[in-house]
Image (cartoon, rainbow, N blue to C red):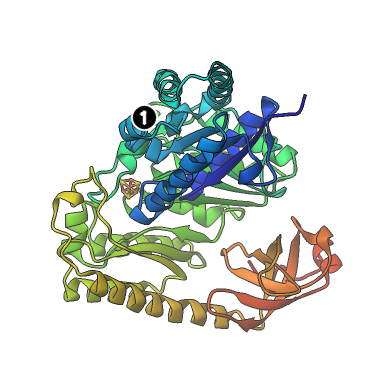
Amino acid sequence: MTATTYHLTSYGCQMNKLDSELVESKLQQRGYRPAADEAAAQVVLINTCSVRQHAEDRVWSKLGKLRLRKKEEPGLVVGVLGCMAQEHRRYLLSRMPHVDLVVGPSAFGDIDATVAAAIARNQELVSSREPARTKHQVVGASMLAVDQGVSGDTIFRDVRVRPHRSQAFVSVMRGCNMPCSYCIVPTTRGDEVSRPVASIVEECQRLCDDGVTEITLLGQTVNAYGRDLTGQNASLAVLLRALHEIPALRRLAFITSHPNFLSPDLVAAIAELPKVARYLHLPAQSGSNAVLKAMRRGYTVERYLARLEQLRERAPDVELHSDFIVGYPGETVADFQATVDLVRRVGFAQSYVFQYSPRPGTAAAELPDDVPRAEKERRNQELLAVQGELTLAKNQALVGQVVEVLVEGDSKVDGRYSGRTAHHRLVHFPTQDRELIGTYVPVRVTAALAHSCLGELLGHDAHQEGRLDRAEVHT
Ligand code: SF4
């Protein structure tokens, strides 16, 4: 008998991508196999994101196409997973009869059984020729039963199922307890639930035993990790120190941090542990105190800068990354200018800039969305241009230096491979040697591009044998 095939499309953040990996791992453990493409799949799953309207629009459009396909293939199983499943569950169940599965992020631990039940149900109903409406109601009801709490320590990962042999993401917590006015995550992902330190260390050890050398810890507010584990001496700093002991691990990163939880302990861990990546993603969101207050971010610009100062004193080599929202309700030209000033003052290495869009169910959605679309676009472009100058200058400063690159694979620049430094800088260099993928190589930077660098591969052997002067290598 041939194996059931599935296709999974993932939208949104890195957390979603990791969830998709975990879902695939469960499906493959049950004997299902990835289809060559979506058109060939018997089970089509979409792991969704609710953070921005654009991401939701793509899912609604995809579901429209799947409705047509299902008319031709009534046995096809269609599943909506993740944040939209949580947020729009009622609508999906009541208005989209071609959707068989609606699975929120907390129910992924049972995804293989849920998919199996939907396949069996569809086969039964197709052979008995019952109408699609009945099909939907029956499977939808069983979904509601499984979409109940799964503890933060649920480990259902097969460490062998991952896209990169040497790199892995590890979820250390779920949910978020912060009150940011514009964000739907606390609604879709629920309260913070941290996994115990020992459980995370064990998963990371198994990954490293299977060839991983770079791990990125994930959490919506990753540096708030452990505050729900009362009396267990669990914090991100404690976790970093424990993971640092794994001999095969060479790089350890974590995303995304909240400015309020950049504690002295965490700063000390970043400064003292050489395996910890030399960049910190610390979203500021705005450079205006009035906007930060309206966003309910819980800090002022002055406090944000003071935290950075503490970090820079202890770990001056750490580069800073940020996120910004432009066009938040009530954001004036002066507020926006304060954001531009903050970006220049801090000198971020990289920033993601988003135009505000109201998310139904959030506090900000009750406010008038009063910055015109064209003005949001103008602010977006201006901020990107300022950040672009800063990024280019940082890349130019690397020209002539030797950097250590973890080779990730084919580059988008022809005939080259690419990889990242410990500062998360993308470097492209010419080689045809596939054996280098997953290894750490020294590359001399020869040119700076807007978002990356070009370089040339140096004596790989010298580096492997430790003959290259450490001081020469800018990690
Ligand atoms: S910290 Fe704020 S923006 Fe980040 S996930 Fe939590 S509520 Fe959303």
Residue 184, given in percent of the width and then of the height, sits at 30, 44
Q: Is 150 drawn above or below residue 339 in the view shown?
A: above
Q: Is mark 1 within 8 Å of ligand 1?
A: no
In this rendering, the answer to whether 254 lies above or below 376 is above
Q: Observer-nearest residue: 39 or 443?
A: 39
Residue at the spot x=71%, y=44% of the render?
247
440 horizontally vs 285: left or right? right
Left or right, residue 162 beside residue 282: right
Q: Amino acid at mark 1?
A: Leu
Q: Tell me residue 124's x, y (percent).
A: 57, 17
Left of 318 or right of it: where is 213?
Answer: right
In the depicted structure, whether residue 206 falls above or below residue 321: above
- Which residue is at the front of the view, 140 or 447? 140
Query: The C terminus appears in which quarter of the rendering?
Result: bottom right
Callout 1 environment at 10 Å: few (<14), some (14 to 19), or many (20+)? Answer: many
Q: Secondary structure at mark 1?
A: helix
The residue shown at (84%, 68%) is 462
Q: Judge whether residue 271 can be spotted in this image.
A: yes
User: Where is residue 123 shown, x and y percent of the image?
Assistant: 59, 21
Q: Residue at x 74, y 38 (%)?
A: 209
Between 225 and 340, the residue placed more toward the observer is: 340
What is the quadrant of the N terminus in the image?
top right
Residue 417 % position (x, y) = 73, 68
Quadrant of residue 348 within the rendered picture: bottom left
* Residue 473 shows in the view: no
For the residue pair 103 and 198, the one nearer the viewer reads as: 103
Q: Which residue is mark 1?
A: 93
Q: Is residue 188 left or right of residue 168?
A: left
